[in-house]
Amino acid sequence: MADRMDSTAITAGGAVFGKLKALGVDYVFANSGTDFPPIIEGLIEATQNGLDLPVPITVPHEHVAVGMAHGFYQISGRIQSVMLHTNVGLSNGITGAINAWCDQIPVLMMSGRTPVMEAGRFGARTVPIGWGQEMFDQTALIREVTKWDYELRFPEQIADLFDRGWAIANSTPKGPVYLSLPREVLCEQTPPDGLDTPSKQAPVIAAPDPSSLKRAADLLAQAKSPLIISQRGAGSEEAFAALGRFLTDWALPLSHYWANQLSVPLSHPMQVGASPEALLAEADVVLVMNSLAPWWPDKVALRDDVTVIQLGPDPLFTRTPIRNFQADVTLAGETAQTLLALIAEMQSRPRDEAVLNARRHRIAELSSANRAEVVARAKRGNAGPMSKDWVSLCLGRAIKGRKATIFHELGCPLEPLDLEQPNSYFQEPHSGGLGWGLAAALGAQLADRDRLVFATIGDGSYMFANPTACHMVAEAHELPVITLVLNNEEWGAVRHSVVGTYKDGLASKANDVPLTSLRPSPDFTRTAEASRAYTETVTEGDALPAALERAIKVATEEKRQVLLNIAIARA
Ligand SMILES: Cc1ncc(C[n+]2csc(CCOP(=O)(O)OP(=O)(O)O)c2C)c(N)n1
Ligand SMILES: [Mg+2]
């Protein structure tokens, strides 16, 4: 090594940044600590040396940092990085990693490792936390929700390890990877070889087996009562458009059951809403598109002769210990490419136009009846306090024709929103690690500053988001996210879960259900105003449309963050 240590050698802590940029990473969402001296010193050195670097963003809570990387990826499709402080920062970020893992979002996660050496080496332990933060296996904290992990042992490994982590994170199925970074190693000098070049390993993009594709196409083409259930979108703009045409062409109904992304426009005549139970019970062929839990096993009985096709990056969800949904045909691959391949395969299949026309007509009627019911129900919630459905209906109307994205975490339900565009809607991952919504909205806004971005979240979810940290980041980086706090002064979902489990039980009759109240409700407008947000409190349903217009005007014209504290009736 020694002969390679010429004057071009740089501090390993800074070298990490150069490598990240070469991998196409734009941002490092960071929460620093005493493991960071070589990172911060190295960053200044790298900047002064004129290296091309990602933008470091100070994020004062780790959960927010990971959520921002998550939301950034959802809008841009580009992996970002998170750099945290030893075991304690890492543990604060792990709920975010659980969410990214569940949602198949690639993230380059890093945290420092407390110095190995107690003395006698540059970077060795100084203050007591050097001992207090050491663990036998720090990585064990996060290993279950990462695809790959490693510890940087030598500074000259930086290029290789980051190339490998990046390629694995971006391989099908995508997900977070983790590197721990010991302080002494980061303090060393390293030659710049390989730091400014893209990854020398390419991600593995899986595509489905041709015979399975043929079988799936045969089944769908011959189905009498087909049904598609899709939870995580179509995978790309192209696939979104193609899926819409495909549904009409083959008269295939699609349900957004517990969907956290949109697969076709909500107004699509083959889009049958979020409750597929009736169609499921009569279905002879079900196509499950990247859905972790496509139905409620205790609630629906499928036909004995049903055939189920599961399509997606990991159709069996192999890292979920128990998941026994039927999967007669599995099509493994990136959702968009696999779907496009299936659509292409169907082109050669024989069709009975009379049968397809009749089915198309029947589903379109179902779809419009469902939409009419959804809108009517939402309108009935126009009181003070109002329903969540009413907020959704008003928000859908307010953003009509605009480039907008709604993040929903116990906020605006999908159905009453009249959304048309891919990427217009993201709900919290099925891991449900609350506090994701506002952070993801900030990340999305950073990825696309021209987009109107809404975080629509329950009052509980807002508090889980570390709101002071979120509003600070929003102000610091001029991110005009509009936060709608749907405030029912409780953890309604927890109360509903008790009442749903114990039907007619004690909780269903109690005026006060223990461990669910969030009273007295804080004045959330003041939390946001502390970071100079524009805020309003909205208590009457009919006042909401104008309040949303004002919010949109402030966000678009003043580029200032907004928070509306909206009074929601307890359902
Ligand atoms: C990190 C985390 N802690 C706790 C929970 C359990 N939990 C699920 S829903 C919920 C309540 C959400 O309350 P809020 O955001 O106000 O929405 P509401 O149900 O009242 O509409 C809680 C506490 C969780 N999902 N994640
Ligand atoms: Mg609530």
Image: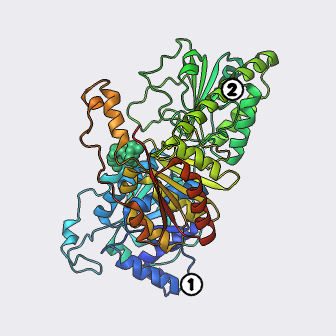
Q: Position of residue 73 (x, y in %)?
A: 55, 56
The residue under label 1 is 50
Name the secondary structure under disc 1.
loop
Q: Report the Cα–Cα distance between label 1 and label 2.
A: 56 Å
Residue at 62 percent across and 64 percent down: it is: 553
Quadrant of the drawing holding the C terminus? top left
Mark earlier in primary sequence (1, 2): 1
Quadrant of the drawing holding the N terminus? bottom left
- Mark 1 burial class by Cα count in 10 Å: few <14, some 14-19, many 20+: few
| Residue 152 can be seen in this image | no
Q: Ligand 1 closer than 8 Å to the CB at disc 2?
A: no
Q: Position of residue 266 (x, y in %)?
A: 65, 38
Q: Position of residue 322 (x, y in %)?
A: 38, 30
- Mark 2 burial class by Cα count in 10 Å: few <14, some 14-19, many 20+: many
* Rendering quadrant holding ligand 1: top left
Residue at 45 percent across and 44 percent down: it is: 102
Colouring scheme applied when the structure was drawn: rainbow
| Residue 551 can be seen in this image | yes
Three-letter code for the amino acid on which mark 2 is drawn: Leu
The residue under label 2 is 252
